[in-house]
Amino acid sequence: MFKRLSFLAMIVMIAFAIPALAGTNVGNVNQTGDLNVATIDQVGSSDVANITQYGTNRADIDQTGNSNQATIVQGAPGNHVYNLYEPSYHPAGDWAMGAYIKQNGNSNTASIIERASDTYAHIYQTGNRNIGSQDIGTYESKANYITFSPHRGVLIDQIGSDNQAYQTTVASFGCYGIDNMQILQQGNWNYANQYSQGGMASVMEIFQTGNSNNSVQYQDGRFSRAHAGITGSSNITNQYQLYTVWSVSGVNSA
């Protein structure tokens, strides 16, 4: 299904699964404009859901089953997305722009890609052998959004074993970076990887509960903080920090 919307009002879209191959449903939504909402709900195995949005929008994908794929792309260079405020006609606290993927099952894949956007990105997965990834480009100064807390929330939450979580954020040197970049994992043999390039005062956190888990944090910026909270046995944690411009100390903490 392909839909294009350009309308200055909240529009709710539900993309129903379209039979493609035996046992496979495909849902596609493409939106251009402001205050749009795209929702795809799928129950089954080997399903595919794709949402692409340019504007001030919200995207939700909810999948139950195994071997499913979910992808959300928001914003693009020259087509900025500002997703931190709620419409004036919407009840306060009942609106959260951004990208949200929820998957329940095994061997699922979730991906969120955001460019030139100020938004929330949340992946929630329960099951085993799942993969969650977030690639966030941040170009704006945090000082422009001091009324919001957190300024930018980037979260992957996984419950199960043999799961993998990857987060990448990129900001220009000299401006502020990600204020809240977090991976939460409960289970065994999980892997978490965080990479933050550029920006100041960025914060990355990994929390793992279980055994034989592995985590890696790489942070290139100034006045930044990397935190790993690990509970269990036979776990491995690695933290790397540097500052590559202006030949001064990064003043970071790990």
Image (tube, rainbow, N blue to C red):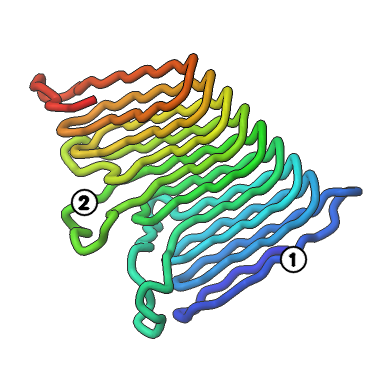
Q: Residue at x 36, y 25 (%)?
A: 217
Q: Which residue reaches farthest left?
A: 248
Query: Which of the two residues, 79 or 131, is positioned nearer the viewer here?
Result: 131
Q: Residue at x 43, y 45 (%)?
A: 155
**CA separation, marks 1 and 2?**
37 Å
Rendering quarter of residue 41: bottom right
Q: Quadrant of the N terminus?
A: bottom right
Q: Which mark is residue 16?
A: 1
Q: x%, y% of residue 159?
A: 57, 40
Q: x%, y% of residue 204?
A: 32, 35
Check contact, mark 1 vs mark 2: CB within 8 A: no
Q: Amino acid at mark 2?
A: Lys
**245 to 61, vertically: above or below:** above
Q: Quadrant of the C terminus?
A: top left
Query: Which of the two residues, 200 or 164, is positioned nearer the viewer here?
Result: 164
Bin the neighbour count of mark 2 within 10 Å (Cα to Cα): few under 14, some 14-19, many 20 and up.
Answer: many
Q: Is residue 30 left or right of residue 240?
A: right
Q: Amino acid at mark 1?
A: Phe
Q: Which residue reaches farthest right?
A: 22
Task: Say what secondary structure mark 1 lies in.
Answer: loop
Q: Residue at x 61, y 65 (%)?
A: 39
Q: Is residue 82 left or right of residue 66?
A: left
**57 to 183, vertically: above or below:** below
The residue that disc 2 covers is 142
